[in-house]
Image (cartoon, rainbow, N blue to C red):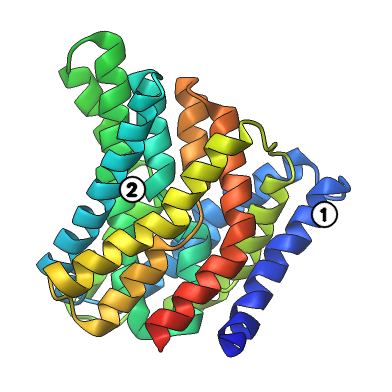
Amino acid sequence: MIAILLKTLPFFALIGLGYWAGRVRFFTPEATGWLTKFVFYFALSAMLFRFASNLSLAEIWDGRFVAAYLWGCGVVYAIAMGAAFWRGISVEEAAIEAQCAVIGNTGFLGVPMLVVLMGPQAAGPILMVLSIDLIVFSTVVTLIITGVRQGRMSLGIIKALAIGLLKNPMIVSMALGLAWSATGFAVPTPINDFMALLGGAATPGALFAIGASLATKSAERVEIAGWLSFCKLVLHPSAVAFAAIYLFRVDPGPASVMIAAAALPVAGNVYILAQHFGVAPHRVSASILISTALSILTVTIVMALVTG
């Protein structure tokens, strides 16, 4: 496990460097916001396009893989919502807490780190996990919250969701990459080199941005944040592993990537959703902070298990 820790440590060290820069105000919240925007719209999108353009849909889509991941997520989602209802909180808060329990930082942390640590063959499974997180669960939490508030589903809600997905650069870049791949033509060398150069900024930029953004987050409601971190770092990869290995018999390679992705800490986009809807943003903030700190150990353990 020491060997795995030494491999993962540089990634978390970059997060730590970003956190330090944010804490001492060398990187202001405004600077962090602009760096995050650069990574989100340009560097990470270029990396995802490059991965997707060199893969076919058949290499990414696997029905057993999708079923196993959805089963594992669904179980933990239900546990988190059940625990929230047991505490007597609202449906909206329960949905946000469930989102914390199953949505990992696949875009900013998983894509750059897991492809490096697990090899280029990990790209397809990671893109599949990212797609499910962005499309399925972002839609579920939005439908729950808006449905409860408005008392019904409307065409306007569905339209707004569709437009939101079409504006997400990660989804667009993956779709464009797969569309290019479907043509059967190789990406021209200048374009491929441009995407490689721009995408190369995604790993350090995303990790630094994660750390800098954590510097502005507080650890309020620690007991709840601790429970949600446990759900994300322990229950989620355990449920996904059970589904992948025993229920759906997913091939070992993709299963390993899926389990490693499930072990990632709470994603920053959950905080964006919580802020947008005005539902428990401080609780989500604390969950991101605590789960990211603990993931230095838990991700190392899971990586050691799946690669072994």
Task: Please give the name of the residue rendered at 74% of the width and 62% of the height, measured from the top-left corner.
Answer: 16
Residue extending farthest to the front is: 86
Q: Which percent across, then down, holds residue 224?
A: 53, 35
- Rendered-image quadrant of the N terminus: bottom right
User: In the figure, is residue 83 to the left or right of 143?
Assistant: right
Q: Classify residue 300 as left or right of residue 273.
A: right
Q: Quadrant of residue 202?
A: bottom right
- x and y, in percent, of residue 189 in the image: 42, 84
Report the front residue among 150 and 250: 250
Where's residue 90, x and y in %? 37, 18
Task: Answer left or right for 10 relative to 267.
Answer: right
Residue 134: which disc? 2
SS category of the residue bearing label 1: helix
Q: Quadrant of residue 176?
A: bottom left
Residue at image coords 72%, 51%:
212
Q: Amino acid at mark 1?
A: Ala
Toward the viewer: 256 or 195? 256
**Is 98 left or right of 66, judged from the image as shown?**
right
Disc 1: which residue: 21
Q: Residue at x 73, y 39 (%)?
A: 216
Amino acid type, label 2: Leu
Mark found first going from the N terminus, 2 or 1? 1
Considering depth in this image, is 203 or 141 the residue closer to the camera?
141
Confirm whether residue 263 shows in the render: yes
Specify the quadrant of the image occupied by residue 79. top left
Q: Is residue 64 above or below residue 100?
A: below
- The numbered dot on residue 266 is none
